[in-house]
Amino acid sequence: METGEPELRAHRRRPVSWVLGGALLVTAWAGGGRLPSFGGLTYAVVGVVGVVALVAALWPGLPRREAPRRLSAPGWQVWVALFAAFGVWEVWALLAGDDPAQPTVSDLLDPVLLSPDWRGLFWVAWLVVGWGLVRR
């Protein structure tokens, strides 16, 4: 009977984890998109979401996926190529100055991020990707 108890406790925690995770993402979406930028309440929501995410990531009972022993060559080469291309693009735009013909990634995303819904979704996506990274 004792062997099933930890599994039972873990099973009971799963729905709670999903509810807490969902509440955190809804709060992030609302805080990232619906609150005014650079406001005191916005800073408070970002701080609370950050602290909750950090505590959740460092929680001792968090099940983690095993990291691969070695990265495949195509996997890391794609990331290096994307990182290099992004870096070259940003440096080129910086050297071009305020030239509209050489926009930065931020300049291209500004029209999308003006919408509160999209801005909130970008923040949620940022948190989900970060969560995927800390699970390893």
Image (cartoon, helix red, strand yellow):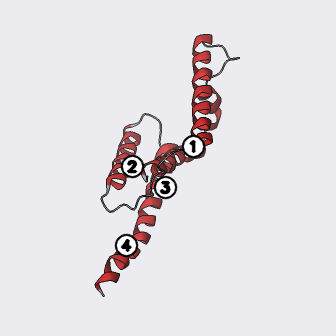
Foreground pick, 8 / 125: 8
Which residue is rendered at x = 37% and y = 46% of the image? 50
* C-alpha distance separating marks 2 and 3: 10 Å
Which residue is rendered at x = 38% and y = 71% of the image? 13
* Disc 4 and disc 2 in contact, CB within 8 angstroms: no
Give the number of the disc on residue 116.
1
Secondary structure beneath dot 1 equals helix
Instruction: Give the residue at mark 3.
Output: 26
Kindly report which numbered mark, 4 or 1, lies closer to the viewer in this rendering: 4
Instruction: Give the residue at mark 4.
Output: 10
Of the two numbered discs 2 and 3 on the same chain, state the one appearing first in sequence.
Answer: 3
**Hey, which quadrant is residue 101 in on the image?**
top right
Q: Residues within 10 Å of mark 1 (few under 14, many from 20)?
A: some
Residue 17 rendering spot, x and y as whole percentages: 41, 65
Q: Residues within 10 Å of mark 4 (few under 14, many from 20)?
A: few
Eyeballing the image, is 55 above or below 47? below
* C-alpha distance separating marks 4 and 1: 37 Å
Kindly report which numbered mark, 3 or 4, lies closer to the viewer in this rendering: 4
Of the two numbered discs 4 and 1 on the same chain, state the one appearing first in sequence.
Answer: 4
* C-alpha distance separating marks 1 and 2: 18 Å
Instruction: Give the residue at mark 2.
Output: 49
Secondary structure beneath dot 4 equals helix
* C-alpha distance separating marks 4 and 2: 24 Å
Give amino acid for label 3.
Val
Give amino acid for label 1.
Pro
Q: Residue furthest right?
A: 101
Eyeballing the image, is 30 above or below 115? below
